[in-house]
Amino acid sequence: MSSQPAAPTDGGDILPRLESMMEAMTRSDLKIAKLILKSPNEFVRSSVRSVATDLGLSEPTVLRFCRTVGCEGFKDLKFRLIQELALAQAMTDQRERATRPAPAPRRPDPAARNLAAGDEAVGDRVFDTIIEALSRTRDTLVEKDLEAAAAAVARAGRVVIYGIGGSSAALATEIHNRLFRLDVPAMVFTDGYAQRMSAAILSEGDVALFLSSTGRPRELQESMELAKYYKAVCIAITDGESPLGRDADICLHVGLAASGVEEFQPNPMRFAQLFVIDRLAYAVAVALGDRAHQMLRRARGSVAWLHGIAPRQPIGD
């Protein structure tokens, strides 16, 4: 007798479900289940026709099996399975990182001895200023402000992200890149006119997130005034002593490097801003809990669908 169809669940694990149902399966369903459990990576690249032909079954039998295990069809079964495989690979990567020994101290590369001493000094200076900016930001970031910002973003009806100019506009887009995969309804605006218009249609429960190196662009200040007038929560990633930082409801302080940055060197502040962006995204994911887990699972599965399971595959980074 065929088992009763399992209740479809968003993101439910297929492999343990198959194992638990095998005793009640028909002979035909058992063949398909064993094939999946034996070679899940190969199964997700197969078709209904190829599975039916390999097992000596009819295509309708394969489709009925999909519904029996709680899926809408063959494609749904494969997509849920590849999500599970991608998550399992990510957990394996995490365990490997946790047990990996610390790297040996860096030693000079004999092949690079022909580099001019001045070139090596420049590389060290760039590296040192980046590390200094990251360390300073880590030490000055206020945890309760970060948690308050994450909570506001997690419960927001919508999040609008503002940045203007070269680096800040690019990083505003990076915030959107971090949030949309968590199912946060986010939009990014890097044009002053669009920022003002979007701020004017915000309401209570929305969040306006501002990113600025100096905290001084007049366009951002005016957009913040509008967003606050319409009762949106205003969060700024900027210098806490700047006009934007002082006016924000929550400011995640990132200050410009005090010294050591030469004329030709890009300011290392963007590394510090990226650190805060990633800390905020991490805190938002924690605040969302299972909702974030399910969305990241979907995102990882969608990438794996294109090229299979890849160790240490980032989710669209």
Image: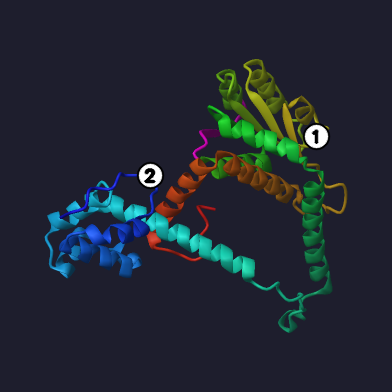
Q: Quadrant of residue 113?
A: bottom right
x, y percent for residue 46: 26, 63
Identified by mark 2, the residue type is Asp
Q: Camera-side residue: 170 or 60?
A: 60
Identified by mark 1, the residue type is Gly
x, y percent for residue 59: 14, 57
Can residue 213 be seen here? The reply is no
Label 1: how many Cα within 10 Å (few below 14, some 14–19, many 20+): many
Q: Quadrant of residue 264?
A: bottom right
Q: Camera-side residue: 316 or 257?
A: 316
To which residue does mark 1 refer? 240
User: Quick one: which residue is furthest to the right in this view?
Assistant: 259
Q: Secondary structure at mark 1?
A: loop
Say left or right for 304 vs 172: left
User: Is 247 located above or below residue 140 in the figure?
Assistant: above
The disc label shown at residue 10, or none: 2
- The span picked out in magenta is 182-192
User: Quick one: which residue is furthest to the bottom in this view?
Assistant: 110
